[in-house]
Image (cartoon, rainbow, N blue to C red):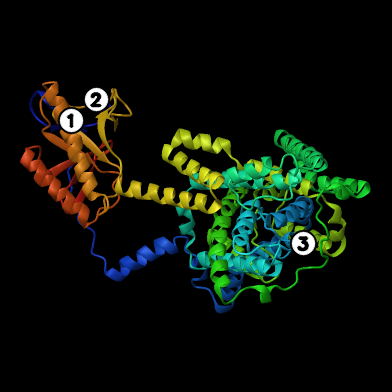
Amino acid sequence: MSGRVTHEMEIGSGPSSRRHTQPSSHIHKVERPPQQNLLTEFQTVIKETFFHDEPLKAFQGQKSHTRFFLVLKAIFPILEWARSYNLEKFRGDLIAGLTIASLCVPQDIAYAKLANLDPQYGLYSSFVPPLIYAFMGSSRDIAIGPVAVVSLWIGTMVQNEIDPKKNALAYRGLVFTATFFAGVTQFALGFFRLGFLIDFLSHAAIVGFVAGVAITVGLQQLKGLLGITNFTKKTDIISVMHSVFGTVHHGWNWETIVIGLSFLAFLLLTKYIAKKYPKLFWVSAIAPLTSVIIATFCVYITRADKEGVAIVQYIKKGINPSSAHEIYWTGDLLLKGFKIGVVAGLIALPEAIAIGRTFAAVKDYNVDGNKEMVARGTMNIVGSMTSCFVATGSFSRSAVNFMAGCTTAVANIVMSCVVLLTLELIAPLFKYTPNAVLASIIIAAVVPLVDIPAAILLWKIDKFDFLACMGAFFGVVFKSMETGLLIAVAISFAKILLQVTRPRTAVLGRLPGTLVYRNVEQYPNALTVSGIMIIRVDSAIYFSNSNYIKERILRWLSNEEEDLKINSQPRIKFLIIEMSPVTDIDTSGIHSFEELHKTLQNRDVMDFYKFHILYVRKLALVYTHCIFFINTEYSS
């Protein structure tokens, strides 16, 4: 650039020399930072790990009564936004609450069947938990209730321990025990600020796991959709298909099939309409309740139940009875309930928190992940003692809630009130509801969980993420939910270990006409300098990867020298290691570079005590035990 005073710095000598220009400025060595004591370093690490959002900052310099009120607002966010609540906001919440209530009532009955519980327990789970969440949750758009994935997990895992038909009381007790420990797990993660642990289950693994569970849930509904009486208790696709086609001549009921397929087509059509015309979202929202009402009426007037059409039977009236006495506090079932509950709690968290943050980003407000986990944990702990099974944020209901114009969590309170009225007044009217229509409601609800575009995107961006997705998916579909979850966790951890122990390194070359250096494998036209090799390290250097980095650098060097020898070109005399992506290095890393230095000295490649790290706008001289930077403006 004109008007800029520059001088030149030579790298190498002789015919292979390449000149780079830089402004005439003095080179100053940056001194080592002052030594910090161990306690200060420990406090910094703890703060960055657990308290990066500074949750106690608002309490500093406040009086005692103000701090008490701030504590209450932290526990009950409703105290924060309730002061500005008005009639206009209530109008939006009322419409949204009534809309999601029309969706949740038939879904709750269906999800209770999925968990092998009587229908009223699904309604119970949409009464108490949403009320608690409305006071403690930080999301304005999440709609709380049972969901297909967790309901199937609870139903499958508890059924493996206790037969729900032979011993319904013990079965319910184990469900409530699992729900209690699901709540304890979620509460503990939030209270001790350990929410980052759920991030170890990658998004790719969650996509595959949820899609696999959606397929499994749909396959399980073939029992109700086809009217099959004797159905396998296994969830893998082979067992289910064998059970379905093994009873085709004597186990299917044509009246049930007509009802199920008719209403499934109707529900899928309304979903298509709502997706194509977003303003008609309410068509899809009221479709499940409409289906239940029409199907129940048709079965009642035709008495199709006497022709083999399975119906819901009696739904008990009244609000949630206490179930604290049914929870197993001792014995072998306590441990089993603990294992099932911990996994159920973890499964319910990632997707629900992601849903809340997605809608919060659209409306530009913050969702506190730790508060969310405390709120969900509390509602499930209380729910386990009031005849509820695990509840969490439902994507379908939350989407409807958002589209219906909800403004606060009051929409959950409105929904709970509608469920209360249903339990007290009209629950018995669902007696003739055919199981086929409930099966069609579940199938329609889980269809969006098979996210094919997300899987395609994973394939395009990261093949390893796609492998994690498919591993979790096929594990669930062909084996079991536990296997799929284990595969998902194993592949997620394997990816972390690979990235830590096998970081990427790259040989750099200059893009023609620029001073930008890029990976020569990605940019084959990048130019290299004869006798000089530039290698970039793309990771912090720790004990787990330091030896690999050293060996990889030497391997790059050896391969390059072999190619040069074949082409009769000058050997490598200078090695430049670009380490701007390196954010940290431990003692093992330092020792590895000392060993690399000795090896390079033996090869007569360079003086390692003054090796160069080249970056587009800065030149760093890195010694064995210290790093200092020289800001440099390159001129053209």
Which structural element holds mark 2? loop
Residue 527 numbered tag:
2
Answer with mark 3 or mark 2, whichever residue precedes in sequence.
3
Q: Secondary structure at mark 3?
A: helix
> Which residue sits at x=53%, y=70%?
335
Q: Residue furthest right?
A: 301
Question: Looking at numbered disc 1 in the image, what kind of residue is underneath it?
Answer: Glu
Can you see residue 489?
A: yes
Kindly report the distance in space between the C-alpha atoms of the residues bearing marks 3 and 2.
71 Å
| Residue topped by disc 1 | 560
Classify mark 1: helix, strand or loop. Answer: helix
The N terminus - image quarter: top left
Residue identified by numbered label 3: 120
Front residue of 61/473: it is 473
Does the CB distance between marks 3 and 2 fall below 8 Å?
A: no
Name which residue type carries label 3. Answer: Gln
Q: Earlier in the sequence, mark 1 or mark 3?
A: 3
- Given this view, does label 3 or label 2 mark the residue nearer the observer? 3
- The percent position of residue 389, horizontal first and vertical second, equals 66, 63
Q: Of callouts 1 and 2, which one flags the residue occurring earlier in the amino acid sequence?
A: 2
Q: Is residue 44 left or right of residue 115?
A: left
